[in-house]
Amino acid sequence: MNDDWYRNKKWNNRIECVFKGKLEKSGSAKVPYLKIQASYLVAKKPEVALRLIEYARAIKEDDFWEQKLCLYESKCLYNLKENVKALEKVYESIEWRRKKSNVQTDNIYWLAELVLRLKKESEYKKCIGILKEFHVESIFPLHEYWHHGYIAIFNDRLGNKEDTIYRKLLKIKSN
């Protein structure tokens, strides 16, 4: 366990006890610690991450973190091979983004990645619409790469060759 008691990459009974003890002493703002810890466990311990998310919701400090919690829950469900639920949760995360536009996560890019991984062709046009809806010019080249890259992939798979070439050129110019 490191000094950041809420950033454990491994999880066992001892770490869980220390985490719970420090969480109890953390005052009233427990959800951010639970959210951060869950994010570290999404890939290797999705069951634990889901428990932490459930606990964060039970505390119900407010719904500020719900967009992020739904995003992590979607990733956990995907890692547990619960693909339908994973897709439902990422769409729920998108709805929270619409409600709380001041909170932005990478949920639109996870949606695109998930839809491509699951080969959900029926969702391609919807993903393009969501990517365009939430696109804001970014100083971070990676966000521009993801945005234009995912749209290019969807258009390519939909057979929209002209739009695909245009998007690829935009992506290259944005780098």
Image (cartoon, rainbow, N blue to C red):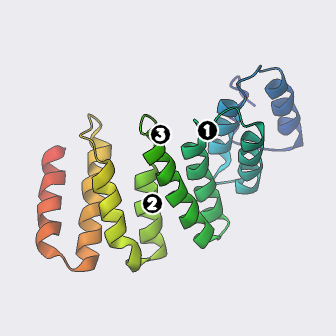
* 132 sits to left or right of 33: left
- The image's mark for residue 63 is 1
Residue 22 percent coordinates (x, y): 81, 24
Instruction: Give the answer, above or below, for where 174 lies relative to 17.
Output: below
Q: Nearer the viewer, mark 2 or mark 1?
A: 1
- Say which residue label 3 marks: 100
Residue 123 percent coordinates (x, y): 40, 73
Q: Residue at x 27, y 62 (%)?
A: 151
- Say which residue label 2 marks: 111
Q: Give amino acid for label 2.
A: Leu
Residue 8 percent coordinates (x, y): 71, 37
Which SS class for mark 1? loop
Q: Residue at x 23, y 40 (%)?
A: 137
C-alpha distance separating marks 2 and 1: 21 Å
The quarter of the picture where residue 153 lies is: bottom left
* 95 sits to left or right of 131: right
Residue 63 percent coordinates (x, y): 61, 38
Q: Give amino acid for label 1.
A: Asp
Q: Give amino acid for label 3.
A: Lys
Q: Are marks 1 and 3 in contact (CB under 8 Å)?
A: yes
* 161 sits to left or right of 97: left
From where the camera sits, is residue 146 visible?
A: no
* 94 sits to left or right of 77: left
First in sequence, mark 1 or 3: give its number.
1
